[in-house]
Amino acid sequence: MVDRPQRVSLLKAEIRHRLSSSFVLDCKFEIHAGFSVLFGASGAGKTSILDCIAGIKRPESGRIEVDEVVCFDSAKKIDLPPSARRMAYVFQDLALFPHLSVLENVIYGLDHLRKETRQEVGHAVLARFGSGHLVQRSTRDLSGGERQRVALARSLVTNPRALLLDEPLAALDRATRLKMIDALQSWNEEHAIPILYVTHSVREALALGQRVLVVEAGQVIAQGTPAEVLDRESWE
């Protein structure tokens, strides 16, 4: 019996979208499973790229494909809704539900599973991110670091095709940030999906990125390993 070759997760994006009369998002790239960092100054277009991939914004033209599923193709008039793309997106403002407990937030998108299974999966992913003791807490009572961990747990519990992270660690202290980076890297070693991580921190890009895409004025102007594209004083 011959083993089947393992499928390699791949996210491909070709996006053209006018954000204003003077700013056009015009980029093309592909990333494999693992961490890829979108690096650039504020206003470069990094979040808009994530929004287009997730389906929150509709590009004027282009094509977006992840794990062999075409999410958007302007030529073929394909435009899957965000729910059908199975992209997990952690926003800068986290967007937790204040009226729900931590566990209820995490399992919110698992209605297709039995209640016992939802609870089991929710407890497991919270424990993975050091938040098992928070299950019954209200999200209103959480610290910034606790909210970040819960938001990450909620994004990963749905087994996404790709993970989009918009500066999720920006508000954390250095020690907590390092713990979260370790937890994310450990999780991805098991699941091997494309992770697109937005930051303007050189330190984070060097710590996380297997590949870095430098974004400037809506375009990817450089890409490669962190050492190749970030070893320049101009990025500091």
Image (cartoon, grey):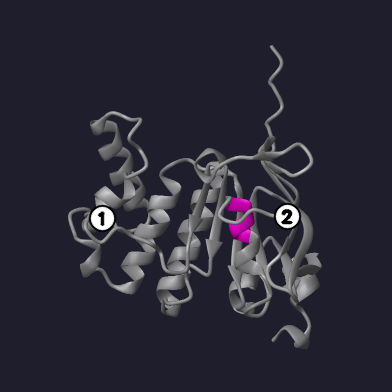
The three-letter code of the residue at mark 2 reads: Glu
SS for dot 2: loop
Residue at the top extreme, as displayed: 1
Residue 222 position in % (x across, y down) = 81, 69
Q: Residue at x 41, y 79 (%)?
A: 173
Q: Quadrant of residue 114?
A: top left
Q: Badge 2: how crowded within 10 Å, few (<14), some, or many (20+)?
A: few
The three-letter code of the residue at mark 1 reads: Val
Q: Is residue 143 left or right of residue 26?
A: left
Q: Residue at x 53, y 38 (%)?
A: 84
Nearer to us in this view, 48 or 155: 48
Q: Is residue 53 left or right of residue 26?
A: left
Q: Main secondary structure of the magenta part?
A: helix
Does 41 lie within the magenta span?
no
Question: Residue 175 has which mark?
Answer: none
Q: Residue at x 35, y 38 (%)?
A: 110
Residue under label 2: 60
Residue under label 1: 102
Residue 177 position in % (x across, y down) = 45, 72
Q: Is 52 drawn above or below residue 10 in the view shown?
A: below
Q: Is 202 drawn above or below residue 160 in the view shown?
A: below
CA gap, disc 1 and disc 2? 38 Å
Q: Which residues are magenta?
A: 50-54
Pair 1/2: label in front: 2
SS for dot 1: helix
Residue 30 position in % (x across, y down) = 75, 51
* Contact (Cβ within 8 Å) of mark 1 with mark 2: no
Return the disc, 1 or 2, that comes first in the chain's sequence.
2
